[in-house]
Amino acid sequence: MKDIFDAKILCEKCNKPMIRKIVDKPGAALRAMKCETCKSIIYHPTDLEKYKQFNSLKGKTYNVKLRVVGNSHAISIPKEIISFIQEQGKMMDDMVRLCFDDMKRITLRFGDRKRWKE
Ligand SMILES: [Zn+2]
């Protein structure tokens, strides 16, 4: 499928070709077109939409029940989080990395297992 950002985009103010950029935002990298003259930026509509969706989920607190499963305890991860991760085209592995990184916090990390080797 052809992407809108594959086309040459001219700055509406300067009428000069805009340059492809990746703009790093907290927790995401967005494709963008930037005018080097007036510095105006156009974000890729798909990336912008995903970023807005991410921000609405980010920092949201869920009350989930701790269940006993054998000798362990299990929680359910809300569907909207899993759906969002899957929509990003990230492989949902059946393995996640869990870290007890604070007395009151457990972190889960999804994604490529190869990247876990830090
Ligand atoms: Zn411009």
Image (cartoon, rainbow, N blue to C red):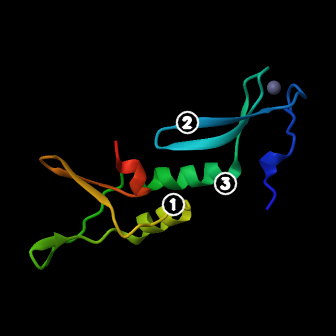
Q: Residue at x 69, y 39 (%)?
A: 32
Q: Earlier in the sequence, mark 2 or mark 3?
A: 2
State which quarter of the image contains the C terminus.
top left
Tag 1 secondary structure: loop
User: Considering only order in the chain, which callout, 1 or 2, is on the residue closer to the N terminus?
Assistant: 2
Q: Residue furthest top?
A: 37
For residue 64, side relative to residue 112 (left or right): left
Q: How many marks?
A: 3
Position above or below: 8 against 72: above
**Marks 2,3: beta carbons within 8 A:** no
Quadrant of the frame with the N terminus: bottom right
Q: Position of residue 68 (x, y in %)?
A: 13, 76
Disc 2 marks a residue whose amino acid type is: Asp
Q: Which residue bears the numbered disc 2?
A: 24
In front: 113, or 65? 113
What's the residue type where badge 1 is placed?
A: Lys
| Label 3 or label 1, whichever comes before in sequence order | 3
**Residue where numbered disc 1 is placed:** 90
- Discs 2/1, front: 1
Give the spatial CA distance, label 2 vs label 3: 15 Å
- Of marks 3 and 1, the one in the foreground: 1
Name the foreground residue: 21 vs 26: 21
Residue 79, compared with residue 34, is above or below; it is below
Q: Residue at x 49, y 53 (%)?
A: 54
Q: Which residue is mark 3?
A: 46
For residue 101, above or below residue 70: above
Q: Residues within 10 Å of mark 3 (few under 14, many from 20)?
A: few
Of the four image quadrants, the one with ligand 1 is top right
Q: Is residue 20 above or below residue 39?
A: below
Residue depicted at x 56% and y 42%: 29
Residue visible at 23% across and 70% down in the picture: 75
